[in-house]
Image (tube, rainbow, N blue to C red):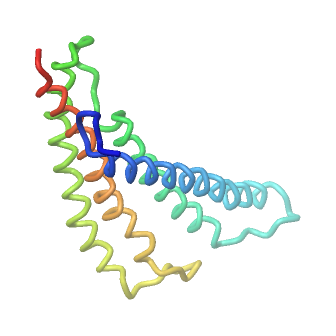
Amino acid sequence: MPNTSPGAPALLRRVNGALASLIAFLLILSVAILVLPVTLQILSRYTPLIPAYIWTEELARFCLVYAVMLGAMLAVREGTHFVVDVFPRLSPIGEARVELISGSFVLIFAFVFLWWGWEFTEFAIYRISELAELPLWIIHAAWPIAGAVWLLFEAERMLNAIAVLRRPA
Protein backbone atom coordinates (compact mmCIF):
# COMPACT_ATOMS: atom_id res chain seq x y z
CA MET A 1 0.00 0.00 0.00
CA PRO A 2 1.51 3.36 -0.96
CA ASN A 3 2.20 6.03 1.63
CA THR A 4 -0.80 8.35 1.45
CA SER A 5 0.00 10.49 4.49
CA PRO A 6 2.11 13.59 3.94
CA GLY A 7 5.50 13.97 5.56
CA ALA A 8 8.12 11.34 6.16
CA PRO A 9 7.99 8.22 3.95
CA ALA A 10 6.23 5.21 5.47
CA LEU A 11 9.45 3.17 5.46
CA LEU A 12 11.27 5.82 7.50
CA ARG A 13 8.36 5.94 9.95
CA ARG A 14 8.37 2.15 10.35
CA VAL A 15 12.15 1.96 10.76
CA ASN A 16 12.15 4.80 13.29
CA GLY A 17 9.23 3.25 15.19
CA ALA A 18 10.99 -0.11 15.44
CA LEU A 19 14.26 1.59 16.37
CA ALA A 20 12.53 3.64 19.07
CA SER A 21 11.00 0.47 20.53
CA LEU A 22 14.40 -1.22 20.61
CA ILE A 23 16.01 1.84 22.20
CA ALA A 24 13.26 2.01 24.85
CA PHE A 25 13.89 -1.66 25.70
CA LEU A 26 17.66 -1.09 25.89
CA LEU A 27 17.11 1.96 28.09
CA ILE A 28 15.01 -0.07 30.51
CA LEU A 29 17.65 -2.81 30.46
CA SER A 30 20.55 -0.43 31.09
CA VAL A 31 18.77 1.21 34.03
CA ALA A 32 17.84 -2.22 35.44
CA ILE A 33 21.45 -3.35 35.17
CA LEU A 34 22.60 -0.05 36.70
CA VAL A 35 20.61 -0.85 39.84
CA LEU A 36 22.71 -3.96 40.58
CA PRO A 37 26.20 -2.42 40.94
CA VAL A 38 24.86 0.67 42.70
CA THR A 39 22.99 -1.51 45.18
CA LEU A 40 26.10 -3.60 45.76
CA GLN A 41 28.15 -0.45 46.36
CA ILE A 42 25.67 0.86 48.92
CA LEU A 43 25.29 -2.44 50.73
CA SER A 44 29.03 -3.05 50.84
CA ARG A 45 29.54 0.30 52.58
CA TYR A 46 27.11 -0.43 55.37
CA THR A 47 27.28 -4.20 55.87
CA PRO A 48 30.27 -6.45 56.41
CA LEU A 49 28.42 -9.31 54.67
CA ILE A 50 29.10 -8.02 51.16
CA PRO A 51 32.66 -7.35 50.03
CA ALA A 52 33.46 -4.02 48.39
CA TYR A 53 33.64 -5.02 44.74
CA ILE A 54 35.80 -2.70 42.70
CA TRP A 55 34.16 -3.45 39.32
CA THR A 56 30.79 -2.09 40.44
CA GLU A 57 31.85 1.54 40.03
CA GLU A 58 32.96 0.98 36.45
CA LEU A 59 29.87 -1.00 35.47
CA ALA A 60 27.63 1.66 37.02
CA ARG A 61 29.43 4.37 35.03
CA PHE A 62 29.11 2.43 31.76
CA CYS A 63 25.41 1.75 32.31
CA LEU A 64 24.84 5.40 33.16
CA VAL A 65 26.54 6.51 29.93
CA TYR A 66 24.29 4.25 27.88
CA ALA A 67 21.18 5.22 29.84
CA VAL A 68 21.87 8.90 29.15
CA MET A 69 22.62 8.39 25.46
CA LEU A 70 19.63 6.09 24.90
CA GLY A 71 17.37 8.55 26.70
CA ALA A 72 18.72 11.38 24.54
CA MET A 73 17.92 9.36 21.41
CA LEU A 74 14.31 8.85 22.51
CA ALA A 75 13.99 12.50 23.50
CA VAL A 76 14.98 13.58 19.97
CA ARG A 77 12.39 11.18 18.55
CA GLU A 78 9.69 12.67 20.78
CA GLY A 79 10.83 16.25 20.19
CA THR A 80 11.60 16.89 23.85
CA HIS A 81 15.38 17.14 23.60
CA PHE A 82 17.12 20.35 22.56
CA VAL A 83 13.77 22.11 22.81
CA VAL A 84 13.06 25.24 24.79
CA ASP A 85 9.50 26.47 25.10
CA VAL A 86 10.09 30.14 24.36
CA PHE A 87 7.09 30.78 22.19
CA PRO A 88 3.45 30.54 23.23
CA ARG A 89 1.28 27.98 21.50
CA LEU A 90 1.81 28.54 17.77
CA SER A 91 -0.24 27.64 14.75
CA PRO A 92 0.68 24.39 12.97
CA ILE A 93 2.62 26.42 10.39
CA GLY A 94 4.48 28.29 13.14
CA GLU A 95 5.23 24.99 14.91
CA ALA A 96 6.56 23.57 11.64
CA ARG A 97 8.84 26.57 11.11
CA VAL A 98 10.19 26.32 14.65
CA GLU A 99 10.71 22.57 14.14
CA LEU A 100 12.76 23.21 11.00
CA ILE A 101 14.92 25.82 12.74
CA SER A 102 15.48 23.80 15.90
CA GLY A 103 15.85 20.63 13.83
CA SER A 104 18.71 22.24 11.94
CA PHE A 105 20.58 22.61 15.22
CA VAL A 106 19.78 19.01 16.16
CA LEU A 107 21.25 17.94 12.81
CA ILE A 108 24.43 19.90 13.55
CA PHE A 109 24.75 18.18 16.92
CA ALA A 110 24.03 14.82 15.29
CA PHE A 111 26.82 15.31 12.75
CA VAL A 112 29.21 16.41 15.53
CA PHE A 113 28.38 13.31 17.57
CA LEU A 114 28.66 11.08 14.52
CA TRP A 115 31.92 12.53 13.18
CA TRP A 116 33.89 13.10 16.37
CA GLY A 117 32.19 10.20 18.11
CA TRP A 118 33.63 7.94 15.44
CA GLU A 119 37.10 9.35 16.13
CA PHE A 120 36.48 8.95 19.86
CA THR A 121 35.56 5.30 19.29
CA GLU A 122 38.59 4.67 17.06
CA PHE A 123 40.81 6.10 19.80
CA ALA A 124 39.50 3.39 22.16
CA ILE A 125 39.57 0.48 19.71
CA TYR A 126 42.55 -1.30 21.32
CA ARG A 127 41.99 -0.13 24.89
CA ILE A 128 40.29 -1.98 27.71
CA SER A 129 38.76 -0.71 30.92
CA GLU A 130 40.97 -1.02 33.97
CA LEU A 131 38.72 -2.93 36.33
CA ALA A 132 36.16 -4.89 34.34
CA GLU A 133 38.53 -5.36 31.38
CA LEU A 134 35.81 -4.50 28.89
CA PRO A 135 36.74 -3.16 25.46
CA LEU A 136 36.37 0.61 25.71
CA TRP A 137 35.19 1.00 22.12
CA ILE A 138 31.87 -0.56 23.20
CA ILE A 139 31.37 2.32 25.62
CA HIS A 140 32.66 5.01 23.26
CA ALA A 141 30.41 3.75 20.44
CA ALA A 142 27.43 5.29 22.23
CA TRP A 143 28.35 8.71 20.77
CA PRO A 144 28.40 7.92 17.03
CA ILE A 145 25.38 5.63 17.46
CA ALA A 146 23.49 8.51 19.07
CA GLY A 147 24.49 10.81 16.21
CA ALA A 148 23.26 8.36 13.58
CA VAL A 149 19.98 7.74 15.38
CA TRP A 150 19.42 11.47 15.86
CA LEU A 151 19.83 11.92 12.09
CA LEU A 152 17.13 9.33 11.41
CA PHE A 153 14.71 10.64 14.01
CA GLU A 154 15.20 14.28 13.10
CA ALA A 155 14.82 13.52 9.39
CA GLU A 156 11.33 12.17 10.09
CA ARG A 157 10.42 15.22 12.21
CA MET A 158 11.69 17.67 9.61
CA LEU A 159 9.98 15.90 6.69
CA ASN A 160 6.72 16.05 8.64
CA ALA A 161 7.27 19.79 9.25
CA ILE A 162 7.96 20.38 5.56
CA ALA A 163 4.71 18.58 4.70
CA VAL A 164 2.82 20.94 7.03
CA LEU A 165 4.36 23.96 5.29
CA ARG A 166 3.53 22.62 1.83
CA ARG A 167 -0.09 21.96 2.72
CA PRO A 168 -2.45 24.31 0.89
CA ALA A 169 -3.78 27.08 3.12
| Quadrant position of residue 81 | top left
95 is higher (above) or lower (below) than 156: above
Q: Residue at x 44, y 69 (%)?
A: 139
Residue 107 at x, y = what percent? 19, 48
155 is higher (above) or lower (below) than 56: above
Identity of the residue furthest to the front in this view: 1
Assign the N terminus to one quadrant of the image.
top left
Q: Residue at x 38, y 53 (%)?
A: 15
Q: As rendered, which of 78 and 130 lies closer to the eye?
A: 78
Q: As rendered, which of 106 and 158 lies closer to the eye?
A: 158
Q: As rendered, which of 86 and 29 lies closer to the eye?
A: 29
Q: Residue at x 61, y 56 (%)?
A: 29
88 is higher (above) or lower (below) than 32: above
Q: How many marks?
A: 0
| Quadrant position of residue 49 | bottom right
- Is 137 placed left or right of 112 in the picture? right
Q: Residue at x 38, y 36 (%)?
A: 78
- Is 128 placed left or right of 95 in the picture? right
Identity of the residue furthest to the right in this view: 49
